[in-house]
Image (cartoon, rainbow, N blue to C red):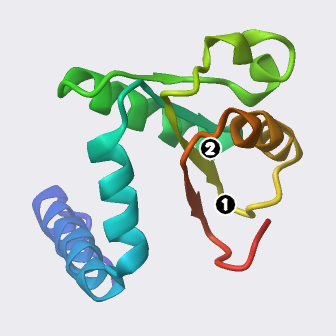
Amino acid sequence: MTSTDPLERAARVLAVEAEGILGLRTKLDGNFARAVEILRTTQGKVVVTGMGKSGLIGRKIAATLASTGTPAFFLHPAEGIHGDVGMVHRSDAAIVLSNSGETEEVLRLLPVFKRLGLPLIALTGVRTST
C-alpha cells in the first residue's frame, strides 16, 4: 500500500534519488575522466545537442554550464543541419546526447563536428551505439 502523505512520499522520492546518485560512483571510469579533461581544456564554447527529451536535458546542461562560467550553448540538431552549424568553431567541444545513440538528426551533425576536429562527449543509453 502506498502512502498518500505528501511528506512520506517526498521522503521516499528523495531516498530513491539519493540511491541513484550514490550508484553513479561505481560507473565513473576513464571515459568520465576524458570528458572532464575535454571540458577543462576547451578553448572555445561547449556545444550541446540532442533531440526530444535528450534535447531538453541538453538545454539544461548548456544553461548550467553557461551560468557557472563555462561558455556553452544548445544547438538544436534540426536547426544545425539547416545552417546554424555556422555557430560552431574549431576551438569548441561538443556534448552529444541521444538515448538510443542512433538519432538521425544528431548523427547528421557528427560529420561536421568531426570535420572541424571537435572533441566529442557522447551521452547515450547504449554504450555500443554509433
Point out residue 79 in the picture as x, y percentages from the top left corner. Answer: 77, 17
| Residue visible at 77% across and 43% down in the picture | 110
In the depicted view, which residue is nearer to us: 12 or 50?
50
Vertical relation: 41 (above or below) 60:
below
| Left or right: 118 as drawn, with respect to 100 | left
Tags 1 and 2 touching, CB below 8 Å:
yes
Count of numbered tags: 2
Which quadrant of the view contains residue 80? top right
The kind of secondary structure element at disc 1 is loop
Instruction: Read off the residue under disc 1.
Output: 99
| Residue visible at 31% across and 56% down in the picture | 37
Point out residue 28 in the picture as x, y percentages from the top left corner. Answer: 31, 79
Instruction: Read off the residue under disc 2.
Output: 53
Vertical relation: 71 (above or below) 112:
above
In the depicted view, which residue is nearer to us: 120 or 74?
120
| Residue visible at 18% across and 66% down in the picture | 14
